[in-house]
Amino acid sequence: MIGVLTHHWAKADKIDEARQLLDRNGEAQSHAPGFVREP
């Protein structure tokens, strides 16, 4: 098993844009075989 933990920083005026990008990346990754998403 491979675990990945990431920490992201965004400028105050770019938080919404950054969250949208991260959500899209997470959605794309969730389609990989064996992907498990833990809160």
Image: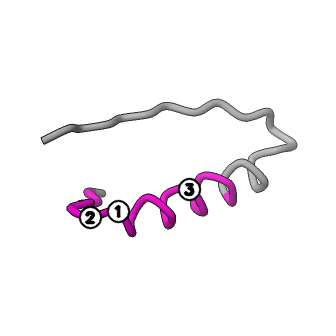
Mark 2 — residue? 33
Task: Identify whether 18 is placed above or below 10.
Answer: below
Image x and y of residue 26, in percent? 48, 58
Marked residue nearer the N-terminal end (2 or 3): 3
**Marks 3 and 2: in contact by CB < 8 Å?**
no
Image x and y of residue 27, in percent? 49, 66
How far is mark 1 from mark 3, CA to CA?
12 Å
**Marks 3 and 1: in contact by CB < 8 Å?**
no
Label 1: state its secondary structure. loop
What amino acid type should be assigned to the residue bearing mark 1? Ala
Marked residue nearer the N-terminal end (1 or 3): 3
- Pointer 3 local density, CA inside 10 Å: few below 14, some 14–19, many at least 20: few
Residue 14 location, quadrant: top right
Horizontally, is 1 left or right of 5 in the view? left
Q: Which residues are magenta?
A: 20-38
What amino acid type should be assigned to the residue bearing mark 2? Pro
**Marks 2 and 1: in contact by CB < 8 Å?**
yes
Between 27 and 39, the one lying in front of the other is 27
Horizontally, is 2 left or right of 12 in the view? left
Mark 1 — residue? 32
- What number of labels is visible? 3
Horizontally, is 6 left or right of 19 in the view? left
